[in-house]
Amino acid sequence: MANIKISVKNLSVSYDGEIALKNINIDVYEKEILGIIGPSRSGKTTFLQVLNRMIDRISCAKVEGKVLFDNLNIYTDIKLLALRRKVGMVYALPLPLPMSIYDNVAYGPRLHGTKDKKKLDEIVERCLRASYLWDEVKDRLESSAFNLSGGQQQRLCISRTLAVEPEVIIYDEPCSGLDPISTAKVEDAMSKLKEKYTQILVTNNVKQAARVADRTAFFLMGEIVEIDETKKIFTAPKDERTNDYITGKFG
């Protein structure tokens, strides 16, 4: 069995007393893709926000329980900036920076002190290749990132995340606004990235979870109903509510 990369123990989150997550216990294994599915307001995005402590920005949020990253407590043993570098996040809407394609990818390494042009060139090419974007943009790296299509912008955001060398990539509905061809390219990138990175994918598209996730967790009203190998979740779920959700009876 693979090593445990992230271990969540008795995690509960509330906003002004309203429960968003209740007693979540889950382990995320090294170099797996963990899919998280569930209807709206089931706590999926809140779960991601805890993992890189973006939830700290929400003043009314109360977090209880423990999250371990390589057996280190993310609140007491890892500095915040170091954690956010280790846990990169890709959002639902592509958010390229208002600069060139090249500078978008080089932005993070420059921020962390990399100035050597040859080194930056290597990072940009490597990360664009990893997100299956290099062949589409290699001849126009100095053009604005806003000239890219939505799907290309999302893969550029993945490249930008990879450039700071995270260990975990978390995705919050990364293909929600993309066409099927762009979605397939993002999914291809995820599958390839599994060779090196641990990934957590929140998606409302259950078919996407079925295609790319190694294991899938079903969240409902702030709780985990069940988690298992993706094939088992989609062919023989243990809980009737899981079956009802993936077959479209609610959600």
Image (tube, rainbow, N blue to C red):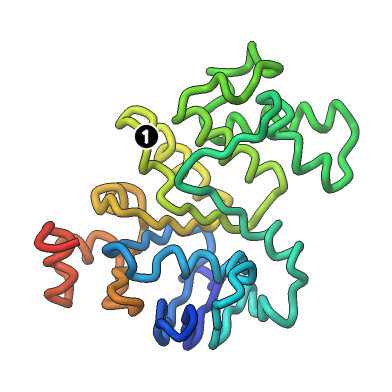
Crowd class of label 1 (few under 14; some 14 to 19; many from 20; radius 10 Å):
some
Is 250 placed above or below 68 here? above
| Residue 36 falls in image quadrant | bottom left
* Residue 72 makes an appearance in the image: no
User: Count of labels shown?
Assistant: 1
The image position of residue 133, as x and y in percent, is 54, 26
According to the picture, the residue beneath numbered tag 1 turns out to be: 178
Residue 203: percent from left, percent from top: 35, 54
**Is residue 190 at all visible to an observer of this figure?**
yes
Residue ID at (41%, 79%)? 21
Which residue in the rendered view is the most extreme toward the top? Answer: 139
Position of the C terminus, as image quadrant, is: bottom left
Left or right? Give the position of 247 relative to 200. left
Q: Position of residue 68 (x, y in %)?
A: 60, 78
Q: Amino acid at mark 1?
A: Leu
Helix, strand or loop status at disc 1: loop
Judge whether 143 appears above or below 98 on screen: above
Query: Residue placed at 76% from the left, 38% from the top?
Result: 107
Residue toward you, 96 or 218: 96
Q: Residue at x 16, y 77 (%)?
A: 239
Q: Which of the 4 image quarters holds residue 83?
A: bottom right
Question: Looking at the image, which residue is at 37% across and 59% down?
Answer: 35
Q: In terms of image quadrants, where is residue 131?
A: top right
Percent of width and height locating residue 124: 70, 30
